Amino acid sequence: MVETNELPPNTFYVEMSGSGLPEVDGLFVPSTAPPAESESGTVSSVGYWNGRMAWDRADGKSARSPALSYSNSYKSWRICRLDGHLAYDATYDDQMPPTDKEWHVYKKGVAPAPKVTLHYFDPRLPCPEPNVVFVIGGPGSGKGTMCELAESQLGWTHLSVGALLRAECQAGGPNAAIIEEFTTAGKLVPNEITVTLIRDTMETITRMTGRRNFLLDGFPRSLENLDRWYEVFGRVAELPRMLYFECPYAVLEKRILDRAKYTGRSDDNVESIKLRFDTFKAETLATVDLFKSKDKCAEIDTSQDRQAVYALVSSQLADYTDETFAARPLTERAEMLLGLRPFPKEEKA
């Protein structure tokens, strides 16, 4: 008999939807069934069955507990109806119920099989607050490179406001038409749409991945952006910290012109660079000054080599970075971004 009494608590929640069975669709919570011996002889701990995490119906009406569990005998995940009859199974050896693989409709099930969504936090409760760091800097200051490194090496989530808006348009979201109208006209998308999109994206990522550390690349671009942030997140919420990537204009211009040889971007030319830099100074530096006045801004000289800049960024994020991420060796991609090895010839640096 295998004892499994030293397992970590099950803190995940599972949502079933779309099966057409009211006694299956709904929220499943960590099982509170007392330790019992399974058909394979395993003695399970609270929240577990057969040594793997297990769930019961949130409404407490399940005829057997756990209602979502793994079978050692059949080597599959199983979803039961309220009457205890098996409705769906998934013959995979995943440690968690598969969310991106097909479930099999069993005798007491109804097609289609349910969509299975894993939540890191109880979806009935407010989402935990995100830990946000704003990343601001002029064009060519290296924001994108450093944010990508922080995401891949330090476990932070990099959110580019521009990328979020483009993705919302492509997905045909409720504000897609408005976003496209403003971006096509070269205007800033209304603050309400931008900040609400940021909030919703962070909440989805937090609930689906458990990750709460976010780098907002290119936000806030103006004091008006910041006012809307307060309206959405509340003025009682602690103001996020800011990383300001400071770099002399001559260095920025050289970087962007060098980059233009590879990117083919229409705005990577001397005239556009000057216009973008002047816009940055006119609209964004006021937010930098505000954060400095509140001792919430760390200024980083990004005219240095990339390795020195990355060391400074890492130190500024260290208080919230998981030590297991910080201790990992550099990936090949990270070494390329830091200039420690060349990019493949077909890839544009």
Image: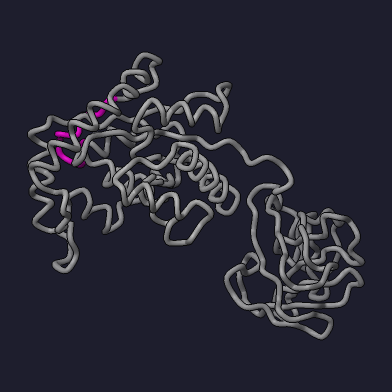
Say which residue appears at 45% left-offset and 28% top-offset: 240
User: From the viewer's perspective, is 94 left or right of 346?
Assistant: right
Residue 110 sits in quarter: bottom right
- Does 73 sit above or below residue 16? below
Q: Quarter holding the C terminus?
A: bottom left
Say which residue appears at 57% left-offset and 70% top-offset: 100
- Does 69 sit above or below residue 267? below
Question: Which residue appears farthest toward the bottom when viewing the image?
Answer: 107
Which x, y percent locates residue 176? Answer: 46, 55
Query: Foreground residue, 346 or 277?
Result: 277
- Does 112 sit above or below residue 225? below
Colour convention of the picture: one colour
Which x, y percent locates residue 286? Answer: 31, 21
**Number of numbered discs:** 0
Which x, y percent locates residue 79? Answer: 77, 72
Q: Quarter holding the N terminus?
A: bottom right
Q: Which segment did they paint magenta? A: 299-308
Query: Foreground residue, 186 or 263?
Result: 186
User: From the viewer's perspective, is 320 left or right of 102?
Assistant: left
Residue 24 sits in quarter: bottom right
- Residue 131 seen from this side: yes
Say which residue appears at 87% left-offset and 77% top-offset: 85
Query: Foreground residue, 10 or 4?
Result: 10
Say which residue appears at 13% left-offset and 30% top-offset: 248
Question: Which residue appears farthest toward the top when viewing the image?
Answer: 293
Q: Does the magenta stretch include residue 185?
A: no
- Residue 341 seen from this side: no
